[in-house]
Structure formats: structure tokens, C-alpha cells
Image: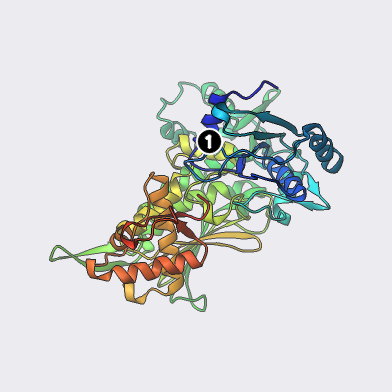
Amino acid sequence: MTQTTHAELAALMARPTEDNHLEFKAAQNQYDTTKLFKRCVAIANEFGGKLIMGVTDRPPRQIIGTAAFPNLAKIEADIFNKLKFRVVVEEVTPCHSDGRVLIFHIPPRPRGTAFQFEGQYLMRVGEETPVMSEDRLREIFNEGAPDWLDEVALDDCDAADVVRLLDTQTFFDLLKLPYPSDRQGVLERLSSQGLVVSVGQRWAIKNIGAILLAKSLAQFESLIFRAPRVIVYQDADKLSTVRDQPGDKGYAVGFEGLIDFINGLVPANEILTSAIREERQLFPKSAIRELVANALVHQDFVETGSSVRIELYSNRLEISNPGKPLISIDRFIDEYKSRNESLAKLMRRFGICEEKSSGIDRVVMLSELYQLPAPDFLVGSHHTTSVIFAPREFKDLDTEGRIRACYQHCCLRYVAREKMTNQSLRERFKLGSKQTETASRIIRDTVEAGKVKLTDPSVKSTRYRSYIPFWA
């Protein structure tokens, strides 16, 4: 391992936020060894990174030096003896006698394996190192197993079968490519994208090919229950079902039709804009599009007996997918981690998905633009659910809804390299200049809920205060 230069250290310190692979600790005098062991395990389980001591954790970061772990050989040996993997500890002495900096170079865990400390498998969530959930552990241990998307949905097909079962015309249209002059050209292009594979003189259609391009998912026995399902309820509960419509087409070839179908079921709401009355859908079509695409792409295909569900109630739209998310719901706006990257990659090429992490950003932005309540994101035992709500007056929002909107607004400002202020929050809620105290109360509630914090706690004037998300 080469020595970290002063310029490289400065570049690390200049990063806007810490993440699962980079963490700073002041540790000016000492640092608890047990905490160090836990940090090393958690970072290793997130595919490795660096733990840097002797540097403040908030930008603009400063080197303050650390006296922790004076014997580097001893702490390296202690880590290895306790954790059974090697962490290299490097000492950097910056210029101008700023103090001693320690960099713990933590390796990634092996594929299909998770490290543990005293019987607990740990991960990073913000500043914490909680125990991994059962589904996350299961996912790690299954990493060595074949990817479900790469498994075969139907084998022993001839060229005619492939073209009969898959909507190859739409495939080429989505990629904006001319349709080949012969069937062999079609199969070669499908094969190059990993959707089918040749087996001698025959062909096998992979799950990813069928799930994206099937003219009818019912033609693939293992995929019948993977089709999205649209359910409409009469009221705000499940007591009376008006419609229950399962899909049948592959995700890519049927996506636009699915979105148009859902949008056609959404009632319109009459609003007054610039003294003109106009009808507007209760939920923006673009928000529906983003959330349905996210649900399709990020579902856990290992979970059986369930599918993506779109449930329309009188006051909200809920979109659920099998499986728990790989990142905290509090980080949906600024982070991205796909469970099915090969599927996501193709959906992006087809123009169905947004670039990484921008989908949820757009949903939250649209909620602000259309003055809707903040969307909600829920994690159940086997599902992840996104909820968008029908329009509601500010006075009708409960405290939880106001806190959620405040936090999401703060996140949007932060990823745009801006800070939330009382004024920006008033603009989000369309509050007047005389409602400063109303906005301040919402901010106080959100701070107390642990969702946002002061950018600079030394600023006493409420007029000049700004706020950032708790994880920033």
C-alpha cells in the first residue's frame, strides 16, 4: 500500500458528506477500542473504506490531530486477533504541524460472507452501526448463488419461438435501433444484451428477457405471478374493491400502457389557477411513472408469492414491491443502491428509469411543485411501499406530515448544494411572510424528531439560521 499524500488527504476531507466507505472521527485524545472494532466490521460489510481519525467530521473539516492508538503495530494486531481480518493503519503527519492523522484502511468483506463482532453482523446507517436485518444477511449469503435474472425462464426454443414469445419489435423501438433484416440478427442482438442464450442449435430465454419483453407473462410458468397488479378501492380503506386488474405484458413492453392505465383511473381535481378553473389529476403522472418504475426495478425476486402492487384509494396511491430496501428510507433522496442492476441498466437504456437516485428526487420535487403532502415510504416485513397523497390544505396536515415534508425539503435543498431556511420552508408550504413562527415551529418539531439539524449551531439569530439533514 502506498503512502497517502497530503493532497489525497485534503481531497478526502473536501468530500461534501461521509458515506458507507468514508468516516471521520476527531478522537483528539483517545478512541474506544470496542467502537473501533464495530466500525471496522460495519465498514467492511459495506465493501470496505477508510476510517480517518484526527479530523473533524463536519465540513469544512479541520485537522486537529489524534493521540489515539500510539502503537500502530499493536492496534493492527488487536484488530486481526479480534476480527480475523487485517486492517492497515497508516499515520499521516500533515504540513504546518497540524497534528497526527490515522487512516484505517478497511478491506471489503468477501463475496457471500459477512463479518461479525461478538456474534453480531453489523452495517453502517448514518453514524450508527446497527445489527443487520435478516433479509440483508440472507441477501449477502445468497451472493454466491446464481442471479435470478440470469436463470432460464424457458429453454429448448427455436428462433421462431423466441420471436413469438418476446416482443422484439418493441425492444428495437425502445433502443431506437432499426429492426434487423433477418431473424438471426434479432437473436444476436438479444443475446448480446444477455436476454437469451444459445444452447447448441436451440435457444433459452432468461428470466430477464422474459420479464422485460414477454408478450404474455402467462406463457412463462415461473413468471405468471410476477406481473404488476392494479387494485382500485372505493374509499380510503380496503373494504370495497372496485377493480382488480393483473398485468400480463413484460415490464418494458407493457410499461407505457400500464402507466396510462393507472393514470386513467386517477380522478381529476378542480383547482383555481390565475382565476381560471382547470382540472388536474390528483397525482402527477410523472410521479406515478417514477414510483412504478422504482418498484419494478428494485423488487426482490427471491421473495415468492407476491408481486408489484399499485393500489388506488380515494385519498392516496400506494405502490408496493416485494423485499426490503437496501438503504434506509431516510436516504432515498440522496443515495442509490439497486438490487437488480442488470435490470435497472436496461430499463434506463429503454428510457423507462431515470439515472441513478434521481427518481425519488423527482417525486418529492413534484409533490412540492403541486403542493401535495410529502410522499411517505414504508418498510414492512416483506414489502417496501411508496405513498403519494391527494391534495390537502396546509391546515389539514398533521404534525407527522409536516415533519416529513420539512425533512424532504431539507434533503432536496442539500443535494442541490443549498440549505433549508425558514423562508424556503414557507415557500414550500406557500405560507405568507407573517407566518414565520408557523414555519419555525415545524422546523423545531423536525429538529426534535432528529431529522434535521442546524448548519452552524453558533448562529443565534433565527433570521440567519439554516438547516441540513441529520446525516449531513
Where, by quadrant of the figure, is residue 179 drawn? top left
- 448 sits left or right of 460 in the view: right
The residue lying toward the viewer, choosing from 164 and 185, is: 185
- 198 sits left or right of 163 in the view: right
- Amino acid type at image mark 1: Met
Q: Name the residue at the left extreme.
A: 275
Q: Residue at x 42, y 26 (%)?
A: 177
Q: Name the residue at the bottom extreme.
A: 239
Q: Position of residue 142 (x, y in %)?
A: 75, 44
- Is residue 259 at least partly visible in the picture? no
Q: Position of residue 44 (x, y in %)?
A: 71, 40
Classify mark 1: helix, strand or loop.
helix
In this view, 133 is above or below 256: below
In this view, 470 is above or below 443: above
Q: Residue at x 49, y 21 (%)?
A: 182
In this view, 69 is above or below 3: below
Q: Which residue is mark 1?
A: 13
Q: Quadrant of the N terminus?
A: top right
- Is residue 4 at least partly visible in the picture? yes
Q: Residue at x 32, y 56 (%)?
A: 464
Q: Position of residue 43 (x, y in %)?
A: 68, 42
In this view, 32 is above or below 462: above
Few, some or many residues within 10 Å of mark 1 (<14, 14–19, 20+): many
